[in-house]
Each structure stands twice: as structure tokens, then as C-alpha cells.
Amino acid sequence: MQPAPRHATLPAAPILPMILPMPVSDRLPPDTADRTFCGWRVRSAVPLPDLPVWRGDGRAPDLCIELGPVPDRLPGATVERPLLQVGGDGACRFAIRGVAAWWVAPDGRRVIMAPDGDPDRADVRTFLLGSVIAIVCMRRSLLPLHACCLERGGAAVAVCGSTGAGKSTLAALLVGRGFRLLADDLTVVDTAGGAAVLPTFPRIKLWRDALDRLGLSSEGLERVRSDLEKFNRPMTAAFCAEPRPLKRLLFLDPDMPATGVAWRRLTAMEALGRIGVAVYRQQMMIRLGLGTDQMARYLAVLSATGGAYALRRPESEAELDALVAFLDGLA
């Protein structure tokens, strides 16, 4: 796979020092204790230091991640693509050459991983907690969005955008203004009875130049992938570990005018179109045959939030202040 494109140029603005620095010692211990993701108890044969330690009840694991053989071809495959196969029973096979292959159970409760080399590599974990966990969520009738999500006053605000749009940098800046992090890059929404964002990772992924502009060091931080200048920044002290109702939905829009109003309300059709594109690994969702089911989830999200907004990324402290006031006013 080609490395992901870098984000757009960051503003050389006085808003950048507002980020609250988090000590590297905040990182979770790299052990194999049960972890939690989306409120599930996760038992893994490989360390998952990106996830908080499970401190809940004694229930059986909701998700088991095992090491073992993964077949080259699934029986009765209905989809056969270079990266993804879907078997006749609904099981999925996802593979990245040189990294690993994964098998995902039809009900999303079990994953088998066959790594190509060291299973503890960051590259392996990045795909496991990205594309593979997105398949798990889809199989559990949840909506994964390519978005960062923050909590403020008991409500969640999701910031969607394409790769490199600046979602994570904006999330870091909002944490510096008192917001708490619910999710970075992958936001999981449960639309059963409304729209609730489930807590995912207590970390933000930032490019090296974003860290530099924010006045943060990359020393001691783990690279997201070995071939990228992108790092996992722990945010456990600012993490919201409980589900929150999604009340605000924003789409970073590079085509917004550089001056004037920094956001605009989208029409219903615009919002539907954008949320469809914002699904995490949208093409994978389509190949899983879930396009029709997801439409109902899009409508549930838009109903719960009262609509959606296009947003220009703030380029100054005054614009960031205005965005915070705007978000607080939507509560």
C-alpha cells in the first residue's frame, strides 16, 4: 500500500500552544491484560497498548483476538478482492502483504490473526485497530465513521474529513480548550435507539510537523507505521471512557471560502451524501453488502444531531474561539 498523504499545511497561528501537553508516561502498559473498546471486553493474544485496560465486570470477552492460521481463500467466497474476501457464511478475510492476514467471524466476536513476522509491530496493530476493527463494527450493526470525536458537556461532536484534512490536529486543539477525546480517526456510532458514540482509543495520531507546530516532541512516541512520520500521542488524561449522545456533526471542507462565515448548515441531501462518503472504509462496507442497512443509520445520525455542518478549519485563535462558542451553542 502507498503511504497515506500528509495533511494540509497547518496554520502558523497563535492557537497552536493551546494544546495541553500529555506526558509520555501516560502510555498504557504493553501487556496482554484484557482491554476495552466500545465498552466491550477485549481479550487478545497480542498486546494492545492503544486500548484502556478492562476494569469492568467478570463477563466473558465480547471480542477475542487470537493468533493462528488464516486460509488463503474462504469457502463459497462471494467477494474476492486483493485485500478483502467475504465467505459464503459471512466470514471475512482481510490481508495486507508483508503485514498480516486476518479472519473475522460473521458475528464480529472473534478475530484470528496470522502476522507476517513479529505480531507486536505497530504496523500490525494499526491495521488491526483500523480496517479489521471496522469490519468487526460493521458485523455488529454499528456505524464506523472516518472522524475524530470529542465530548463537551455530556454531548459528542464528530469531526469528519478526508485523510489529511486536519481532523486529528483540530481534535488536539479542542482538547486544549477543555474538550475530552472519545475517538480519533475511527468513530463508532451505535444507532439503536438514537445515536451514541462509543469510546475507542485514548490517543491521537499526529504527523511530525503537526507535533512540531503544536510544540510537542515525538521523542518516545510510537510510529503509527514504520514507514510513516506519524506518531501515536497518548491522551488518556483527556479521554472520555463512557458513551455519549452524538449531538453535533461537522465535515471539514477544504472548499469553504477562506474568509467570511467559517461554517454553513448542509441541506438534507448534502448531509446524506457526505455521511456516506465519511463511512470508514466505505468500499469495504459496500462489498460486505451493507449499503442498504447503513442508510437507516445515516438517517438516525442526522435525526439525532438535527443536521450537519460544513466547516472551515480554524486558522487563528479567534477562529478557534468562535468554533468553540458555536459548538457550545449547539448543545
Image: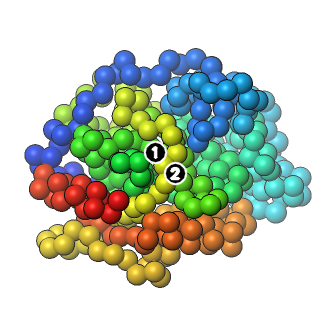
Q: Mark 2: few, some, or many residues within 10 Å (few <14, many ≥20)? A: many
Examine the image and state in which quarter residue 267 appears: bottom left
Q: Residue at x 54, y 54 (%)?
A: 196
Amino acid at the residue labelled 2: Val
In the drawing, does residue 168 fall left or right of residue 193? left
Query: How is the structure coloured here?
Result: rainbow
Examine the image and state in which quarter residue 129 appears: top right
Q: Where is 43 relative to 259, above or below?
A: above
For label 1, the SS is strand
Is residue 307 visible in this depiction of the protein?
yes
Mark nearer the N terminus (1 vs 2): 1
Q: Nearer the viewer, residue 239 or 79?
A: 239
Q: Where is 297 relative to 77, above or below?
A: below
Q: Are marks 1 and 2 in contact (CB under 8 Å)?
A: yes
Q: Which residue was labeled with disc 2? A: 197
In the drawing, does residue 200 fall left or right of residue 239? right
Q: Residue at x 39, y 42 (%)?
A: 181
Q: Quadrant of the C terminus?
A: bottom left
In front of the other: label 1 or label 2?
A: 2
Q: How many marks?
A: 2
Label ID, residue 212: none
Q: Residue at x 49, y 76 (%)?
A: 273
In the drawing, does residue 224 fall left or right of residue 91? left
Distance between the alpha carbons at the discs numbered 1 and 2: 9 Å
Examine the image and state in which quarter residue 182 appears: top left
Label ID, residue 183: 1
Amino acid at the residue labelled 1: Ala
x and y percentages locating residue 58 in the rendered image: 72, 24
In the drawing, does residue 301 fall left or right of residue 207? right
